[in-house]
Amino acid sequence: MPRWWSCMRSIPGCRDEFDCMPEGMSYALQTGYKAPELYVQWQGGRLLNLDKIEKPTCALRLKSTGISFRLFTGQMGLAQAYAQHAFSMQGEIADVMRLARLVNLVEGYLFPKFITKHILTDIPALQVNPLRVYGRVLCGFLTGRYN
């Protein structure tokens, strides 16, 4: 997830969410003890990947690396993880809901329909061809933009 996170701005529903974000809004995704972590901050009209944020606006803490693997490989959706108490959240409810909407939109674009029908409670209407989103992610990797 860390490297394609910033491509979300190309998805129309995500752009609306980003346009409502206040400057300095930050999210932390933590996956367990000594496991990879993701810190991003909305600053200057861009989503920046950071090494660490001491006090993020919203933090999502997954209870194990196994849960994070299932979540990010399309074996489990965010709603199912919530129902199984697989993560904890810290922050304002509006910020948490924004993160949930963003994750659902991105999963709708990045996973094929046979996966999304099992992991999403409501499949978002796709306004952009998913191949365009895949292309942008691939170009970002090839040009080193996500490093």
Image (spheres, helix red, strand yellow):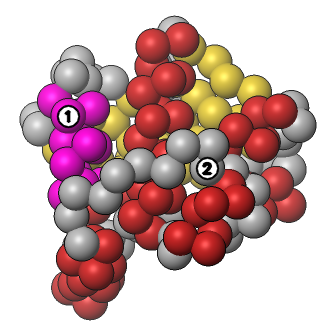
Tag of residue 16: 1
Using the rendered view, name the quadrant where residue 136 is placed: bottom left
The total number of labels drawn is 2
Q: Position of residue 31 (x, y in %)?
A: 73, 49
Residue at image coords 33%, 36%:
41
Using the rendered view, name the quadrant where residue 23 is placed: top left
Residue in the foreground of this view, choosing between 59 and 111: 111
| Whether residue 54 is visible | yes
Residues in magenta? 8-19
Residue in the foreground of this view, choosing between 46 and 129: 129
Q: Is residue 132 shown above or below 102?
A: below
Q: Is residue 82 shown above or below 15?
A: above
Image position of 39 (left or right of 120)? left
Q: Amino acid at mark 1?
A: Asp
Q: Is residue 8 shown above or below 94?
A: below
Tag of residue 120: 2
Dominant secondary-structure state across the stretch colored magenta: helix
Q: Earlier in the sequence, mark 2 or mark 1?
A: 1
